[in-house]
Amino acid sequence: MTQNNLRFVAHIDILGMSELVARDAELAWQVLSDLVEARNHVNNFELTFLDTDERTPVRAQVHCVTFSDTIVLFSKSDTLIDLRTILVVTTEMFNKALSTCIPIRVGIAHGKFFFNLDDSMYAGPALIEAYRLGERAQWIGLAASEAVYLRAQEADLKSRSANIVVEADIPIDSGSYIGYAVNWPEILERHPHVTVPITIAQFYSAFEHLFGPFSALPARVQAKYVNSVRFFNTRVAAT
């Protein structure tokens, strides 16, 4: 462990998994299997950051633990390499999940986090904050803490000319609040089959086989897809 136990922690879960399990357990298992495959795919990456030319195997920098339909990622320490790696891993997992039609939401935080891999023990304020950030946000997306945003700003982390972590209007049940998010449209926009601006119908069509027609969804669930499309189009328009 690091001396101060400060790390970057990400909490990832699948939207609508409980309802899907109740309706079609085999399909739910396939969705979870696909997400784990996405996790394994990213876990085998070896990253090279162009400004430093430093090679970083993801497995050496970030630990990954799966609990049911939840994946927790946490960094080795809280250096700039740790931050960059956790951001790459979460956005690539998010992108891979979307490409295989899995709706996920992510919370990313920084703070104290303790673990014992041998005894499967994990605890710390950073995990609680990451969980709350992800669960509170009513969208498919990646919410980040202020500490993550400030560290990314300090390091001037960008994709092309856009900031990777941005100030954003985060949708919640009671409305919204000004918070921070990973600028995932900067990655997805590059996909050749994605046209912008996207419509709600286009975005939701990837998930219809899991949850049925959009019109049949409860209003609260519909709002998550509406909010995701709004964020995507807003960020693309800003870049």
Image (spheres, rainbow, N blue to C red):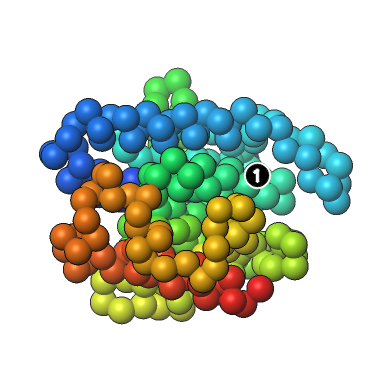
Q: Is residue 21 visible?
A: yes
Residue 218 location, quadrant: bottom left
Q: Nearer the viewer, residue 105 or 136?
A: 105
Q: Name the residue under label 1.
A: 85
In the picture, the quarter occupied by the C terminus is: bottom right
- Location of residue 99 in the rendering, given as x and y in whole percent from the top left corner: 48, 44
Quick check: can you spot residue 9? no
Q: Is residue 80 left or right of residue 169?
A: right
Q: Quadrant of residue 72?
A: top left
Image spot of residue 211 (x, y percent):
23, 49
Give the residue displayed 33% in from the left and 46% down from the top. 14
Q: Which residue is drawn at 45% across and 20% down?
A: 118
Q: In the rendered structure, which amino acid carries the disc numbered 1?
A: Thr
From the image, which quarter does the N terminus lie in?
top right
168 sits to left or right of 66: right
Looking at the image, which residue is at 35% across and 57% down? 204
Q: Residue 209: x percent and y percent?
A: 27, 44
Query: What is the crowding at mark 1: few (fewer than 14 residues within 10 Å), some, or many (at least 20)?
Result: many
Residue 27, image quadrant: top left
**Number of marks in the image?**
1
Under circle 1, the secondary element is helix
- Tell which of 208 and 141 is nearer to you: 208
